[in-house]
Image (spheres, rainbow, N blue to C red):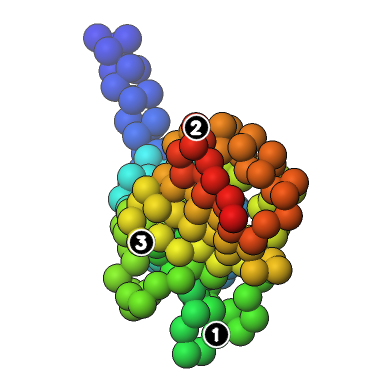
Amino acid sequence: MVVLLSAIGLAGGVTWALLGSGLVAVRSVVVTGTRLVPRSAVLAVADIRPGTPLVRVNTARIAGRVLTIRQVLAVQVSTSWPDRVVIAVQERTPALAVVVPRGFDLIDAYGVVVELVQTRPVILPVYTTSAPVSSLRGDPGVSAAAAVLGTLPAPLRPTVTSVTVPSPDEVTLELRGGVTVVWGGPDDAAAKAKELSILMRTHSRYYDVSSPATAVTN
């Protein structure tokens, strides 16, 4: 009986320490990985109240709330005993620029607007489209354009000024100097790059490597 009472007393003490004493309650929230999103915005959406017992912190719900921030692609929320919550944010990465009345909307590979800027970053080609930028989320053309850009040879990538995608398997690149490259879909990237490097020795202004076996130029 004495042993049982001792065990009950110990369990009660542990429960009190975890839930009622404030010894293992939230005293600080650490946010990492943010550049575009203000830390204050993450904290506001996370809505973690100081003094909440750490065992009552629902990390999944907090992550779900943080994911409602448009610029956030992924997030991991964890607790660090005895009194800390860590929110590790992965922000979306701009892949293309879309011309809008106020400048350029930078969108990621999923067509989500990441940032509005006045001047286009030189490393981001313009995505040529007549559709409103609000309709590009989940657009397969945007995904195809981003995939193609990601597989281009390193020396070629900075020379791309704009991308046109009539369909996901018809990605066309405009390079500096008025050079056009019909790349096709994201597939066979290595073969297309090899053929293009050979064709570009002709110093032409038009190349079609959409079918590497029958690549042409004029």
Q: Nearer the viewer, mark 1 or mark 2?
A: 2
Horizontal relation, residue 143 to residue 33: left or right: left
Q: Amino acid at mark 3?
A: Pro
- Considering only order in the chain, which callout, 2 or 1, is on the residue closer to the N terminus? 1
User: At 47% across and 84% down in the image, what residue appears?
Assistant: 100
Q: Amino acid at mark 1?
A: Gly
- Considering only order in the chain, which callout, 3 or 2, is on the residue closer to the N terminus? 3
Residue 184 vertical position relative to residue 101 in the rendered view, above or below? above
Q: Nearer the viewer, mark 2 or mark 3?
A: 2
Task: Give the SS element for disc 1.
Answer: strand
Image position, residue 109 (x, y; %): 45, 55
Q: Amino acid at mark 2?
A: Ala
Q: How many marks?
A: 3
Task: Give the SS element for disc 3.
Answer: loop
User: At 37% across and 23% down in the image, what residue appears?
Assistant: 10
- Considering only order in the chain, which callout, 1 or 3, is on the residue closer to the N terminus? 1
Instruction: Give the label on residue 213, or none.
Output: 2
Is residue 151 visible to us here? Answer: yes
Residue 56 vertical position relative to residue 107 in the rendered view, above or below? above
Instruction: Give the label on residue 155, or none.
Output: none
Residue to which mark 3 is pinned: 166
Horizontal relation, residue 62 to residue 77: left or right: left
Q: Residues within 10 Å of mark 2 (few under 14, many from 20)?
A: few
Residue to which mark 1 is pinned: 103
Relative to the observer, which residue lies in front, 133 or 196? Answer: 196
Q: Quadrant of the C terminus?
A: bottom right
Relative to the observer, which residue lies in front, 131 or 77? Answer: 131
